[in-house]
Image (cartoon, rainbow, N blue to C red):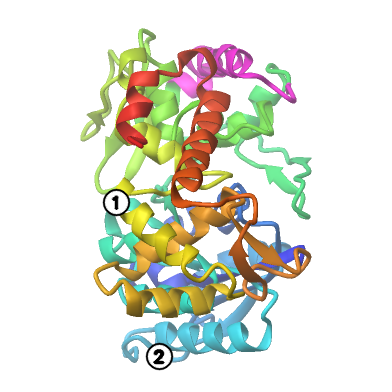
Amino acid sequence: MSIFNTAIFYDIENLTKGYSFSKDFIKELSLKQIYRQILEVDIVNKICLQRAYANWSDHRLSLLRGEINELGIDPIQIFGFARYHKKNAADIQLVVDTMDITIRFPHIEVYVIVSGDGGFASLAKKLHEYGKQVIGCAYENSANDIFKSVCDYFIKLELPEEYSPEDINTDPKNITFGNNKGLGVGINHPLVVRMANNIQTIHQADKKTIFSHGQKIISWFGQDPESRRQMYGHGIPLSTVREAFKYAIPEFKPEMVGFMRFAEFLQFICANTELCVGTLPPSNTLLVFRNSIPNGVVILSDILNEDLHTPERYQSLLASGKPRITIEDKYSLEIFVDTLISKRDILMNISEILDIFSQELPTFESNKLNNLCLSLIHCNILKGYPEDDNISEQKFHISPDFKDTAQILEHVKQTSLNKLISILVDDFKTNVFEEVISF
């Protein structure tokens, strides 16, 4: 399997929410932060190529030049983005380039579309036909629901705030901490730089340590004078708090402690403290004081221990990370496996499996077929050959270890059980699991 398995395509028009953006907005738009969030997705190994589509002759976008160069992004010039723009020019070029790369570079398995445009749903489905995985990446409240639903993963971005220079009065430094996927990404926010002088970095943290160290980080934000001033004024953006955690606990991911989203993790560790999590429409998430809520901010409810154990949360945990298991219901899995067993002597690549099954199981949507297929691969039920090839080029068949449908269903259940126990440890609830995997 190729180490360089991922391509990223940035729709800058979508990131800037049109053409009326200000320079202050661009100052707070961090491609580096987006890149960092993409690297956190398990299926991403190393980045093979990156392209960003915009009218780069717009002088306001020159503020992104430093990050464009540092991240190795190829800027693609799209004329007509300004006042008299040609509709969908960047979208069309992005789609053309994506399909060209799919054909010319088969080792690229993961395509990241940094946009919330619903038109890219068709592109995602076409990439699935080629056996590729798709990561969508956009502001949560402006992302098209259909596009989000067909992506294998979806990264929710925080909408940049338009700070004025006087909002931060500390001298910024630049402490760089490496990352294991090939790029040194800096700790840039002045608050995080200051926190780095007071909070130690820990590695290989277990669940208990993550919670206790997380409490120290949150406590620091509540005690630091500059942080307090910002929280009383407009709140601390979630991206800043996330950056603090990435410094203090480099390997940390919310899924490690039973949360799908970083905001939910904060809602949990802030419970019964002076701090809480709020949102400022349309999509800003902030850390604020409970007793001094900034104008317009809506407070999110604390998440308590009893809120952690629901079928929906367990399903989300199974569908994230590895092994990735997305099973909607026992009936669909049984039908899919029965059909696979009838063809167990045939070697098929993913595209062939999906093509054949879409004809034999016409009531199954393509996304469901794709999820079932990938779930069986992640559970080592569908074995690919040659193993060193990328997944789109491998030929698959059912492992000879599995003789019938009942045995496969039991293996899926046991694999799901092991994964949830490894995440939740002593907090795992058998009764909730039985609701999720009822076979």
Which residue appears farthest toward the top when viewing the image? 272
| Residue identified by numbered label 1 | 331
Sequence-wise, the earlier of marks 2 and 1 is 2
Front in this rendered view, residue 229 or 317: 317
Task: Classify mark 1: residues with Cα within 10 Å, few (<14), some (14-19) or many (20+).
Answer: few
Where the N terminus falls, by quadrant? bottom right
Left or right of 352? Residue 87 is left
Label 2 vs label 1, nearer the camera: 1
Front in this rendered view, residue 104 or 68: 104
Q: Is 220 part of what is drawn in magenta?
A: yes
* Residue at 57 percent of width and 35 percent of height: 253
Front in this rendered view, residue 206 or 141: 206
* Residue at 52 percent of width and 47 percent of height: 324
Q: Is 415 part of what is drawn in magenta?
A: no
- In the drawing, what numbered circle is on residue 80? 2
Up/down of 16 relative to 376, above or below: below
Residue 321 at x, y = what percent? 55, 44
Task: Classify mark 2: residues with Cα within 10 Å, few (<14), some (14-19) or many (20+).
Answer: some
Residue 135 at x, y = what percent? 49, 61
Residue 206 at x, y = what percent? 65, 19
Left or right of 214? Residue 19 is left
- In the drawing, what numbered circle is on residue 254? none
Q: Looking at the rendering, which quadrant does residue 246 occupy?
A: top right
Q: Which residues are magenta?
A: 201-228
Residue 137 at x, y = what percent? 45, 59
* Residue at 61 percent of width and 88 percent of height: 103
Which residue type does callout 2 highlight?
Gly
* Residue at 39 percent of width and 20 percent of height: 430
Assign a secondary structure to mark 2: loop
Which residue type does callout 1 highlight?
Tyr
In terms of secondary structure, what is the magenta stretch mainly? Answer: helix
Left or right of 28? Residue 38 is right
